[in-house]
Amino acid sequence: KKFGVVGGRAWRFLCGVSSLASNILHMQSPGQNNIADEKDYGNTDSTPETLSPHWSVGFTPNIAGSLINLSSPAKRKLFYTSGHTGVIADLSTNEQTFLRGHTNEITAVTSSKDRKFLVTGESGPENVIIVWDLETCSPVQTITDAFGDGVVDLHMCSSSRYIAALSRDKSPQLLAIWDREAKSNEPVAKIEFELEYEFQHCVRFNDDNEWELLTNGGKKITFWSWENSTLTPQNPTNGIDSVKKKSGTMTHSTFVSGSKKVVSATTAGDIVLWDVSMDYEGKSEDREPIKAVRIGQGASLNLIQVCKNYIVTAGDDGAVHFFDFHLKAIAWFEDIKAGGVHSVSFCTFDEAGAEKNSGDSDPKKFQCPNFVVSTNGGKIVEINYKMFKTIHPEKRRGLLLQDGFASDVLCVASHPRKPNVFASGTASGTLKLWNIENRKCIHSLNLGGAISAMEFRPDGRTLVVGVGSGKLQFLLFDESTDKKLNGTELKVEREMKDLSHPISCISFSPCGNYFATGDHGRYVALYRWYHRDERPNKPIEWIYIGRYRSHRKAIVSVSFLPGNWGRESKARRDAKTANATPVLFSVGEDKLLHEYDVVNSSITKGVKLACTTRSDEQSIPTAMLPIGGLKPTLACANDGYQVKLWKGTEKSDEDGNVNKEYQCIRTTLAPQYSGPLNKMIVVPEVVKSGMEIRDSVYVLYSTYAKVVGLIKQPVDGNPIKSSALIAHCGEISSTACTCDGRYVITAGKRDRGVNVWSVNLGALDSSVILGGDPKISFYDLLGGVNGEVVTEMKRYFYLCQLKNQSLYTTDARKITHSIPEEQVINLFRAMGFYMSESECRNLRQEMRESEEITKSKEGAPMVDFDNLVRLYANHRPVRGLTRKEVDSAVQTFVRSKNDGGSSVKREVLLDRLMTHGDSMTEEELVHCLRTLQGEGGECYTELVERLPERLSADDIAEELLGLEPRC
C-alpha cells in the first residue's frame, strides 16, 4: 500500500538504488541464387504445424538400453532416443517416424519381447511415462506425474502386461508397478525406500516369473516378490565385495533364464554371479554372490543381458562379449572400434535359428540373432554373428548404420547458396557437412579443437570456423560436378591465430568483404578481404584489422546491418549492397549497444567505435537482430521478455559535428516460453517463380533452452502472431535457417542431436487470421475486456481526460476518447508500474513515432484506450519486482561502500541516489523522504537527520521503503 501512495517517487528511489548497484557491478570489472531445380517453392508443406520434424541427426548415447532393434524379415527398423523425442528409423527407405509426447529428456526405455509395445520415461518436472503401440506409432497409455523428479529406469515383463519403474527421486526413492490392462493409471504396487537406503538405478523383471523382480544400486541389490500386490524385499547378506575386492560398483543386473541365477555388471569390468546357496540339510536359501569374473582389462561394463543361451555384456572398451550360463567365454567382438557401447539389441527374427532348423548349421558353433549396438561415439553399428569367425579385423567392424556426434554439438551453419547443405561443429573438433535431401553426412574432418562458432561467406565458397582458444580456420568449399553433392569437400585453406579467447560468434557483412567476431574475452575483432598489409601491390587475402574490447561483460551478439530487408528479391538486394557501406553492431550483457565505424577502421588505426547507446536499465540483452531497408532498425531482446526496436538518428552539436545516437522507438512483449529469446533470424522465402529468394515477414527465434518458434512481422507483442515448439530437452546451442527458408536447423548441446524442421508459414498466417481482432489479444493479456485490470484502467483513463481539461472547469467538456502522453505515464504509475526516467523517454519516443497513435494539430500524441492497453501490456514488467531483487540491489550498494560493517552511512546513500543511475534532484528526494516518513513540512536537513546514521540492507528495504520483513 505504501508503494501505491508514494507512486513513482518511491519507485524512483528504488530504481536509483538498483541502477547504482548495476553501475557498481559494471565497474568491476553476392549473386543470385539458382534453385530452379527444387520441386516445390518455399514454405508449402501441408502440415498444420508451423515447424514440424523432418530429420533428426544423432541420438542421446549414454542411456543404457535406449537402442531397440525393430527389424524383422519384412522390415529393417531401429528405435533410439534424441533428447525428448523417440525416433524410429527405417533403414530401407531412410525415413524417420517421430514419437513426440515428452517435454524432458527421455531417460529410460523398454519394450515388449514381441516388439509390439514400447515404453518411454522422462526425468524432470511434470514428467510422464508413455506406452506406445509400435504398429501405429501412437501412444496407448500415458501415466502423468508418476514421480516427482522422473524415471531412472523402466522394464516391461515378458507378458507385456506389467511395467516396473524406479524414480529419480532421492528423498525418498520409489519403486512402482503398473498394470497396462488396468483402467486406472494408479500403480498396482508401490513402495518407498528408506532414506538411508542406497540409490537404486536398475530394475528388471524375471522373464520366468513376472511376480519377481530385482533392483540394484552401486553396492546393494534387492530381490522383490509382489504376488499379493505388496512388494516384499529380500536383501542378500553379502555384497559384491565378498567375492572380489575392488570390484567397483554395479551398473546393471538381470535374471538368467531357466535358473535361479542372477548376473550383475560392474564398473571394474567384473561379472558377478548370484545364486541360491544350500545349507547343510540341502535346503535352498536366498541368493548370494557366488563368484566374479573380470573381462579383458577391466573396463567398465555398461550393461548385461541374456539372449537365448548367452549372457551378453558391453562396456567402455567398445567390445561385446558372450558367455554361457557358467560364465565361460563363448564369443567376443572387440574390433568394432566405434566407442564405448551403451546399448545392445538383438533382431527378433533369429537368422541363426532359421539356419539351424534348415539343417545348414552346426549346433556346437556360436550362433545368435544379428544385433545392433550404440556407442558414446555417436555411432550405431550392425553386427552379424558370423563376423566372429572372420580373420581380418577390418571385416569385424560391422556395418555402420548411423554416425552422429561423439560430443556436444556447439554450432550449426546453413550454406547461403545450397538449400540442402548445412555444417555442424562439436566440442571434440569434428566438423561435418550434411545433405538434407539425401539425409547423409557428405564430409567430415577434425579440426583439432572445440568448434565454438562458424559461418559461411555470403558467396558460399568459404566457411570460417572458430576453433579452440581463438583460432580461426578458413575452409574452402569445393564442389564437384556431382549434383547430389557427394563430391563436396571442405579443405583448410588458411589459419589465423590473432585472437586469444574462444570465439562465440561470427558475422559476415552483406558484401562478403568483412567479417567480425565476438569472443569470451569480450573483444570484437574485424577482418577484411583486401590486399595484404593494406598495400595495393600485395595479393588479396583475409587480413586482420584489429580488435576492440568494447564490453565489460559477455558479448551477446555481433552482427552487420543487412543491405535491405523486406519483400525485395535477394538478387536485387545483392546488386544494391555490393558497394554499400557495411555497418557493424554489438550488444553485451553490460547493456551497451555499440556501432562500429567499419570504413575508417584499418590496421594502423585499429577498430573504430562510432557510437554507444545504453540498451536497458533493468533487463539484460539476450539477442539482437539488425533490420535493414530504407529505415534500418535494431531489434534487441532482453531477459525481461521484451523486444526493443532502435532507430539511428544524427544530431549536430554546437561545433557543427554530427553525432549519431540510437533511440528506442518501440517496446513489445516477446514470446514467453522457457526463457528469454537468445537468437533471432529473418526467414527467407522463395518466390513462386522458384528462381529468386527474398526475406519474408517472419522471424525465427530460439530460447536458451528447449523452445524455437516463429514471429510474424511487424513485432508488436501480439501473442497470436507467434508460435513455439519444444525442439530440444535442454540447452539449444545454435540455430540456423536454410537459404530458401524451407527448413530450420537446431542443435541440442547436451542431447548431441541436430534437428531439421520443415517450415510452414501458412500455418502461422492461418493462426493470425483465426485469432480475430488483434486488439483483443492485448486485453486478454491483462485478464480480458471485463477483467479487473482493464476496468481499473478505464477509470483512470476517464480521470485523465477530466484532468487534461481541468477538474474544476465549468465549461462544456469535449469527449476526445484520448489522453496526452504525459497522462499516459501518470496512468501507468497509478496502475503500479513505476517507470524510470529512461523508460519514460522510450515510451514518449514510441508514442511520437507510432503510426497507430493519432496526433493533435500541434503534432502531440493523443492515445486512445485501445492503444493505451497495448502500450501497457508491452511495457509493464512481465515479472513483478521481488523482495530478493530488492535485497540484492541494496546489499550490492552496501557492500560497495562498506567501511567495516554491514551498513552504509545515510549521507553516502543519499549522495549516490542524487548522482548515479536514475538520479534524483534534491527536491525530488525531499518529496520522496517526506512521503515515505509519513510527515510533511520539514526541510531536507531535518528529513535526513530523521534517518539512522547508518542503514543496513534490511533498514533500507523495510524501514525506509516499507517492504514486508523477510520470513
Image (cartoon, helix red, strand yellow):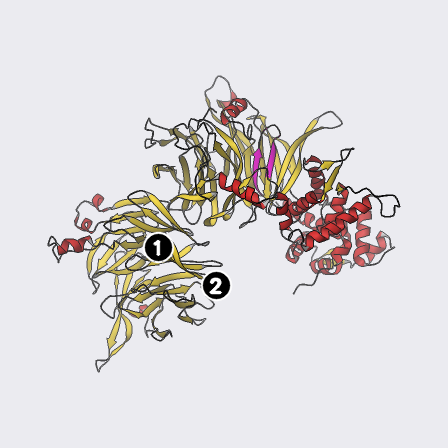
Give the amino acid type for the residue marked by disc 1 in the picture: Ser
- Which is the main secondary structure of the residues drawn in magenta? strand
Residue at image position (33%, 47%) is 89
Marks 2 and 1 close (CB-CB < 8 Å):
no
Point out residue 277 in the picture as x, y percentages from the top left corner. 25, 75
How far across and how far down the image is residue 683, in percent?
Answer: 50, 36
Instruction: Work out which quarter of the rendered image holds the C terminus and state it.
Output: bottom right
Mark linked to residue 889: none
What is the quadrant of residue 459 in the picture?
A: top left
Which residue is at the front of the view, 504 or 364? 364
Judged from the image, the secondary structure of the residue bearing numbered disc 1 is: loop
Residue that label 2 marks:
148
Distance between mark 2 and mark 1 Cα atoms: 22 Å
Asked if residue 544 lies in the magenta stretch, the reply is no
Tell me which numbered mark, 2 or 1, is placed earlier along the sequence: 1
- State the residue position of label 1: 66
